Amino acid sequence: MPNIKDVAKKANVSVATVSRVLNNKGYVDNHTRILVEQAIKDLNYVPNEVARTLFRKSSKLIGIVLYDLKNEFFNEMISQIESLIFDRGYQTMICTTGENHERETYYFQALATNKVAGLIICSDVTSQGINILPNIPTVSLERIIKDTIPSIDCDNVMGGYLAGKKLIALGCCNILQFTGPLNLSSSCERSNGFLSALSDFSHIEVSSYELDFNTFTREAILTHLKNHPDVDGIFAASDKIAVNVMKCLNLLRRQTPEDVKIIGFDNVSIAELSTPTLSTIAQPVAQMSKAAIDTLFELINEEPVTELHKIIPVEFIERESTVVPG
């Protein structure tokens, strides 16, 4: 198998010149570049990525850190991000932390050892974890993990506000809100937006209950529903929570949307597969994915970041859970 020295010999140039062509770094005149590229083609040379990593002091590898692989919303986003990364000639290394600090530290050390070129974080991380990779270009998704680290998020406040306005328009007066974990900025923003939409309507009764996105139980939902037998409108901070609320209402012999209107958040596939189908706030997955990659490569290429904390608009998608059959 030919190596970089064989390419240099065939092109009659130095190994350093071949490296500059392979890594597209440093000046190489056009004539010399053509000679090197032709030698690579003639020899069918495949660059050794490990050697290139040592030369560049970073790999063509992007690390992705997330909580787990059970969240459909993040699965869809990671799939799009991985494709965008591949289109730029890079590969991905996916790490799931489960918000376990020891596991997080292990993965961050592994990412550092592999000299990742960049990092996308879709999970809460400790300051200790972030400090392991102080010089790695990093973008966070759906949360601000540090003021100086660029972030991409949807307009959670507007999403909650749209949900609140829709339930008001439907005439709902006894409303429940199932928030996500309130230690997450996204959950707080959705809740704040929702409550702001209702703030001028003194006749509306609103109760809020916090649920973990990953570990909530139907028993907890049932308890809250039983404590509010007159509920006629519900906003849930995720589609998964909303569909489980719908199932619990069925157990209590309450119909959606005839008795209770329900709005979720995310617009994942379960929203279209539920019975009835779920009205929801759609997160702009494609736009968020592209914005994350564009920002990350601005950092990698040492270009100015166009927007440090980018917020992308959301959209209300109406389905059967808020439309009473005529």
Image (cartoon, rainbow, N blue to C red):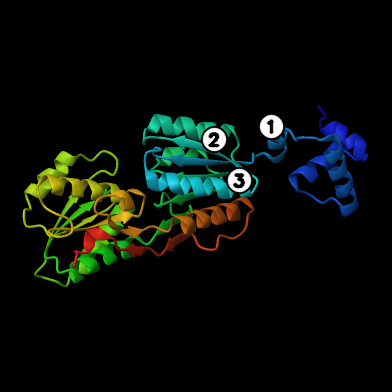
Q: Splitting the image into 4 quarters, where does residue 285 fall?
A: bottom left
Q: Residues within 10 Å of mark 3 (few under 14, many from 20)?
A: some
Mark count: 3
Task: Give the percent coordinates (x, y) of residue 270.
Answer: 32, 48
Picture residue at 81% right of the left edge, 30% below the top: 3
Q: Which residue is mark 1?
A: 50
Q: Secondary structure at mark 3?
A: helix
Residue type pointed to by label 2: Leu
Q: Is residue 144 left or right of residue 80?
A: left
In front of the other: label 3 or label 2? 3
Q: Residues within 10 Å of mark 2 (few under 14, many from 20)?
A: many
Residue type pointed to by label 1: Val
Residue type pointed to by label 3: Phe
Task: Give the percent coordinates (x, y) of residue 51.
Answer: 72, 32
Q: Splitting the image into 4 quarters, where does residue 8 fall?
A: top right
Q: Which residue is mark 2?
A: 111
Q: Residues within 10 Å of mark 1 (few under 14, many from 20)?
A: few
Q: Which residue is mark 3?
A: 86
Q: Nearer the viewer, residue 250 or 286?
A: 250
In front of the other: label 1 or label 3? 3
Q: Secondary structure at mark 2?
A: helix
Task: Give the percent coordinates (x, y) of residue 121.
Answer: 46, 45
Picture residue at 17% right of the left edge, 50% below the top: 209
Q: Nearer the viewer, residue 94 or 275?
A: 275
Q: Secondary structure at mark 1?
A: helix
CB atoms of marks 3 and 2 within 8 Å: no
CB atoms of marks 1 and 2 within 8 Å: no
The CA span between labels 1 and 3 is: 18 Å
Q: Is residue 249 above or below residue 15?
A: below
